[in-house]
Amino acid sequence: KRPDVLLCNEPTGALDFQTGVLVLEVIERINQELGTTTAVITHNAGISAMADRVISIADGRIAHLHVNETKARPRDLSW
């Protein structure tokens, strides 16, 4: 399937670091190869370094929007 939007709720939440990196690499590859827009919902601030945009929500509203000038690769993340 080729979804227009892929929603990922805590995709690394219950995973060890190595498996989490593997999952993030797959998400990154899907974005690159299929051009899919992906929303990753996470409490893991380290993952935000690989995003184009980071949207923080507080009290049901957008509290902050940050655009990453450069994106980190999953293997370069730490958490």
Image (cartoon, helix red, strand yellow):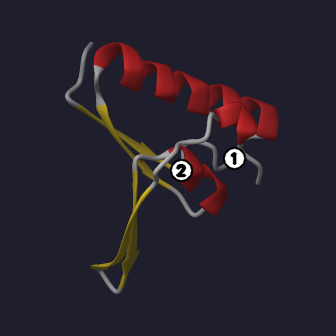
The correct choice, above or below, for 45 with respect to 27 in the image is below
Q: State the mark number for residue 14.
A: 1
- 43 sits left or right of 30 in the view: right
- Which three-letter amino acid code belongs to the residue tagged 2? Glu
Which element is circle 2 on? loop
The correct choice, above or below, for 51 with respect to 37 in the image is below
Residue 77 in percent (x, y) is at 71, 44
Position of the N terminus by quadrant: top left
Q: State the mark number for residue 48.
A: none
- 24 sits left or right of 7 in the view: right
Instruction: Give the quarter of the image for residue 5.
Output: top left
Residue 73 in percent (x, y) is at 62, 34
Residue 33 in percent (x, y) is at 37, 13
- Which three-letter amino acid code belongs to the residue tagged 1? Ala
Q: Residue furthest front?
A: 69
Residue 40 in percent (x, y) is at 44, 48
Please tell me how crowded label 1 is: few (under 14), some (14-19), or many (20+) other residues with Cα within 10 Å.
Answer: few
Position of the C terminus by quadrant: bottom right
Instruction: Give the quarter of the image for residue 64.
Output: bottom left
Q: Tell which of 60 and 54 is nearer to you.
A: 54
- 60 sits left or right of 40 in the view: left
Identify residue for label 2.
Answer: 10
Please tell me how crowded label 2 is: few (under 14), some (14-19), or many (20+) other residues with Cα within 10 Å.
Answer: few
